[in-house]
Amino acid sequence: MSKKQVLLLFVSAGLILAAVLGVYFYRSNLGPSRAEVSALLSAFTEKIASGALDEARQLMTEDTRALLRDPGTQLGETVYRELKLKSIDSVRSEGGGPYTADVVFTTPDTMKIMTKAGMLFAEKAAEEGPAEDPDQAIANIYTEILSRDDLPTIDNFCVVRLELQNGRLLIRGDAALQQALEGGQRVELQN
């Protein structure tokens, strides 16, 4: 093999290597695809709705897992059980990460449910006088409301933040996501 052929071989190998590395780095800077984000958010909402909160937390960054709280009340349990992923409108990156997705979740409307419960409690108190056990009386009203098939729902828009950590796409929880998952209102779901 002549020096010219060896040089041509090295130049060709260098060009091929440069092309492969270029494609790799270009793809790695694109971030997650819409399909990857959709699969992650679908799995996340399905795990919450099925009550597998520990599994749902594993889809979040470790430092934000505590934001997915245990519901603690019948209203909270119903909100989580009825959680649906309605849409993902866009996935984008700010300078190579973190990534964001415009997401709409559908949940029972906690504000309407709480307002209805308050009105029913007041009506019952006006008709029958004060309840002996007000906590039990309101719990009974919530049980009645939450057992209905026609609960009012609300679409909650949220910009969900995502991160690639060790090649794994995870949700970076924040107060906006927490609020969207809990029915669109800043309601304390813990007892």
Image: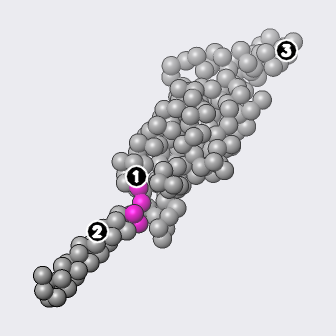
Q: Quick check: 73 above or below 157?
A: above
- Quadrant in the picture for residue 28: bottom left
Determine the CA span between mark 2 and mark 3.
72 Å
Earlier in the chain: of badge 2 and badge 1, it is 2
Q: In the figure, is residue 63 to the left or right of 150?
A: right
Determine the CA span between mark 2 and mark 1.
32 Å
Report the magenta residues as a range. Answer: 28-32
Q: In the figure, is residue 178 to the left or right of 124?
A: left
- Of residues 113 and 59, the one nearer the viewer is 59
Q: Quick check: 122 above or below 4?
A: above
Residue at numbered disc 3 = 133
Residue 57 sits inside the magenta stretch:
no
Are there few (<14), some (14-19), or many (20+) residues within 10 Å of tag 1? few
Determine the CA span between mark 3 and mark 1.
47 Å
The kind of residue on which mark 2 rests is Val
Q: Residue 117 at what x, y percent from top left?
A: 69, 25
Residue 30 sits inside the magenta stretch:
yes
Instruction: Give the secondary structure at mark 3.
Output: loop
Residue at 64% x, 15% y: name it: 144
Q: Residue 64 at what x, y percent from top left?
A: 65, 48
Residue at numbered disc 2 = 20
Q: Residue 73 at what x, y percent from top left?
A: 70, 26
Are there few (<14), some (14-19), or many (20+) residues within 10 Å of tag 2? few
Q: Which mark is residue 89?
A: 1
Residue 153 visible at all: no
